[in-house]
Amino acid sequence: MVIEADVELGANVCVDGRRSRDADRAGTKVDNLVQIAHNVQVGEGCLLVAQVGISGSTTIGHHTVFAASPVPPAPAHRRPVVVGAKSAVYKDVPDGEFVTGIPARPHREWLKANAGLQRLDQLRERLGRLERRSGGSRLWKRG
């Protein structure tokens, strides 16, 4: 395993079995309680915040930021990527993207979906009123 210049590894960082060509590149900062699985390539100037888990055989591009607890499979980036806290990445993230959620998706898209979720009870009540007014069958039963 190669650890290049100016790499910082915090307390209780676990770096699993790696090949000699696997490297943590210059300027990368790894916070406490980070799990880096086997055969992981970490690019230059990355920031891995506490409780991040990196899946085996993942390639992380330069200047990528992982907030707490993402679990990425094999993305590789040429432009910086940011993965928000408590997000789960199941596929490659496009270069320069900021993703959040489970599964991770563009942050603005996640915000819009979450806003709609917050209005779900109101929409269900409105639908019930419309059904009663129209005399139609009840499509949505409140559980």
Image: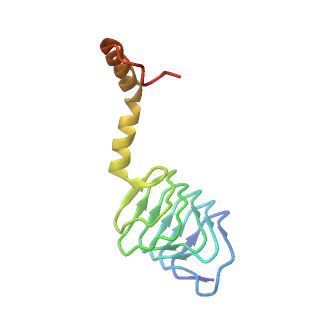
List x then y, in percent, for residue 108: 32, 49
List x then y, in percent, for residue 27: 47, 75
Residue in the image at 56% along x and 62% along y: 31
50 vs 109: above or below = below
Q: Tally the numbered discs.
A: 0
Horizontally, residue 13 falls left or right of residue 102, namely right
Horizontally, residue 139 falls left or right of residue 24, namely left
Q: How is the image coloured?
A: rainbow
Closer to us: 57 or 79:
57
Can you name the residue that lies furthest to the bottom here? 20
Where is the N terminus found, in terms of image quarters?
Answer: bottom right
List x then y, in percent, for residue 91: 47, 64
Closer to us: 109 or 126:
126
54 vs 62: above or below = above
Horizontally, residue 53 falls left or right of residue 28, namely right
Residue in the image at 44% along x and 67% along y: 92
Residue in the image at 36% along x and 51% along y: 107
Q: Which corner quadrant of the image does residue 135 belong to?
A: top left
Residue in the image at 59% along x and 56% along y: 51
List x then y, in percent, for residue 81: 39, 65
